[in-house]
């Protein structure tokens, strides 16, 4: 950063920054509301199953087995579910393609009965998922009923809760950037701006992935304060522990983020020990351990008692038909080739930005756009890693520690799905499959979204280090415009769909 840019960043009034971030929060809310309303129900990313868990939790139920979807859920699925996510494309709209609520009951009665009978046989294989997201959406569902919403409007009411999540996430991205780089205006605003305009379709859906970045985003910021503090306090330990517990109780696949976080706390503890300040930190460490460990332990025991294993995943794995490979069979996996590894990495990076929704059985994406996101993300992450290896020439020690923590979080969760890709034989499963034995679901990486975007924007800052802040913001604006224009182009068919909110 040049001296002029440094003065600009330091002298930029806090009230102006705050106003810009509030505008970004508003933009994020509008963005999510509009696209959530445009997408019809129910998408191919298990939205029916997650909705069923929401409905059941709205009645105060925690599932004890892989049970069928409820009758209440079935009613909403058969009435408001669009067939176009998995149906083959046709060039004409006929009476059968119109929503049931727009047709006479005599015409659709037999179809509805047949669909209801079929859906009552469907098993909710996500029954062992942690309950936090579903308890929140279940309460929100009940609030919608109290407000007088019903039918399709009540369905969209649950989706619209994501607008609240995204607004908080934008603010958390700003706080994280400002904490790590107090003198870099570009990094303050780059992360929240990208979050506000991110075309991730998970934010337009009912699914627990949308809560992960918020929970771990809060935990990440609190742990940064822990790492920066000369002496962590008990209150910080309580809130950091609860945020980590919430991350786990949102989705068990966030466990790698907890592992890296605990490692960061242990390294901080070692530094306190060497500085002979550890006794004063014991209350903070104890409160952190209790608040993080106790909720996690309770859920693990619940899964062991109810589902037979500590994660509750064995029942789902059996349902899907996956089998564990012998250790010797891990290594012939194509992921260990250059092409296979790029297939895995690029697939995750592209879908981390755009999501995994199918439309007429084809990915709702463009190959060129996917390649842009994958190549740009990989390149900027590489630049960020190079800068970390140049310590202390590029970053201060606190900045290096924060970015190393961010890189560890993102690398750990990617490595986790790398490992899952090689240990299972996916048999006849649709995805992952024997033909495509990779977990390439970017939504599963969303817990590490703020760490990822911090590295992304830091890498962009390093790529443009010889340029002014004006040039950097111009480049960021270009990326955001590309995101918005490509998203509108790709998702435009949704807006005319007769099943969406705009046509109710």
Image (cartoon, helix red, strand yellow):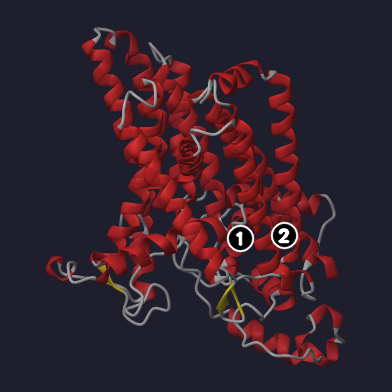
| Image x and y of residue 349, in percent | 45, 57
| Image x and y of residue 480, in percent | 64, 49
| Displayed quadrant of residue 388 | top left
Q: Which of the two residues, 158 or 352, is positioned nearer the viewer here?
A: 352
Q: What residue is at 43 percent from the left and 16 percent from the top?
A: 234
The residue pinned by badge 2 equals 35
Q: What residue is at 70 percent from the left and 55 percent from the top?
A: 158
The residue pinned by badge 1 equals 201
Question: Is any part of residue 252 visible from this angle?
Answer: no
| Image x and y of residue 145, in percent | 78, 54
Q: Which of the two residues, 52 or 243, is positioned nearer the viewer here?
A: 243
- Circle number at residue 375: none
Q: Is residue 387 left or right of residue 152?
A: left
Q: What residue is at 14 percent from the left and 65 percent from the top?
A: 327
Q: Which of the two residues, 504 or 377, is positioned nearer the viewer here?
A: 377
Q: Are marks 2 and 1 in contact (CB under 8 Å)?
A: yes
The answer to whether residue 396 is above or below residue 463 is above
| Displayed quadrant of residue 381 | top left
Q: Which of the two residues, 299 or 78, is positioned nearer the viewer here?
A: 78
| Image x and y of residue 354, in percent | 56, 60
């Amino acid at each position: 950063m040049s001296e002029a840019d440094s003065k600009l960043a330091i002298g930029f009034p806090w009230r102006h920054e705050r106003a810009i971030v509030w505008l970004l929060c508003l933009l994020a809310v509008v963005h999510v509301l509009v696209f959530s309303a445009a997408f019809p129900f129910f998408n191919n990313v298990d939205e029916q199953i997650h909705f069923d868990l929401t409905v059941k939790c709205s009645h105060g139920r925690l599932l004890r087995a892989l049970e069928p979807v409820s009758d209440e859920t079935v009613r909403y699925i058969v009435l408001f579910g669009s067939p176009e996510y998995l149906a083959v494309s046709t060039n004409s709209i006929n009476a059968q393609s119109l929503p049931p609520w727009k047709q006479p009951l005599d015409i659709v009665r037999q179809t509805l009965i047949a669909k209801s009978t079929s859906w009552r046989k469907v098993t909710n294989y996500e029954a062992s998922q942690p309950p936090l997201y579903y308890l929140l959406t279940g309460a929100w569902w009940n609030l919608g009923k109290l407000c007088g919403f019903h039918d399709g409007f009540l369905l969209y009411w649950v989706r619209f809760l994501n607008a609240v999540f995204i607004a908080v996430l934008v603010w958390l991205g700003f706080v994280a950037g400002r904490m790590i780089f107090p003198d870099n205006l570009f990094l303050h605003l780059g992360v929240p701006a990208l979050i506000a305009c991110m075309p991730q379709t998970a934010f337009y859906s009912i699914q627990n992935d949308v809560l992960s970045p918020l929970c771990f985003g809060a935990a990440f910021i609190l742990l940064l304060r822990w790492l920066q503090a000369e002496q962590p306090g008990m209150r910080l330990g309580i809130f950091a522990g609860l945020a980590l517990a919430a991350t786990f109780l949102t989705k068990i696949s966030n466990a790698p983020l907890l592992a890296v976080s605990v490692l960061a706390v242990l390294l901080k503890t070692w530094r306190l020990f060497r500085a002979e300040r550890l006794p004063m930190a014991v209350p903070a460490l104890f409160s952190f351990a209790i608040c993080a460990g106790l909720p996690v332990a309770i859920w693990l025991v619940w899964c062991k008692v109810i589902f037979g294993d500590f994660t509750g995943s064995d029942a789902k794995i059996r349902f899907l038909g996956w089998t564990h490979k012998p250790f010797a069979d891990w290594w012939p996996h194509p992921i260990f080739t250059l092409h296979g590894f790029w297939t895995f990495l690029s697939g995750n990076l592209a879908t981390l930005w755009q999501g995994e929704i199918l439309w007429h059985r084809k990915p709702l994406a463009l190959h060129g756009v996917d390649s842009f996101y994958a190549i740009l993300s990989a390149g900027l992450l590489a630049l960020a890693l190079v800068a970390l290896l140049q310590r202390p020439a590029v970053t201060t020690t606190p900045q290096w520690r924060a970015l190393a923590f961010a890189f560890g979080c993102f690398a750990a969760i990617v490595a986790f799905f790398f490992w899952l890709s090689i240990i299972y034989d996916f048999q006849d499963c649709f995805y992952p499959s024997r033909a495509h034995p990779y977990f390439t679901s970017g939504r599963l990486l969303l817990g590490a979204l703020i760490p990822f975007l911090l590295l992304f924007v830091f890498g962009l800052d390093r790529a443009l280090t010889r340029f002014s802040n004006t040039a950097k913001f111009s480049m960021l604006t270009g990326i955001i415009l590309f995101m918005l224009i490509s998203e509108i182009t790709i998702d435009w068919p949704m807006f005319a769909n007769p099943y969406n909110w705009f046509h109710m």
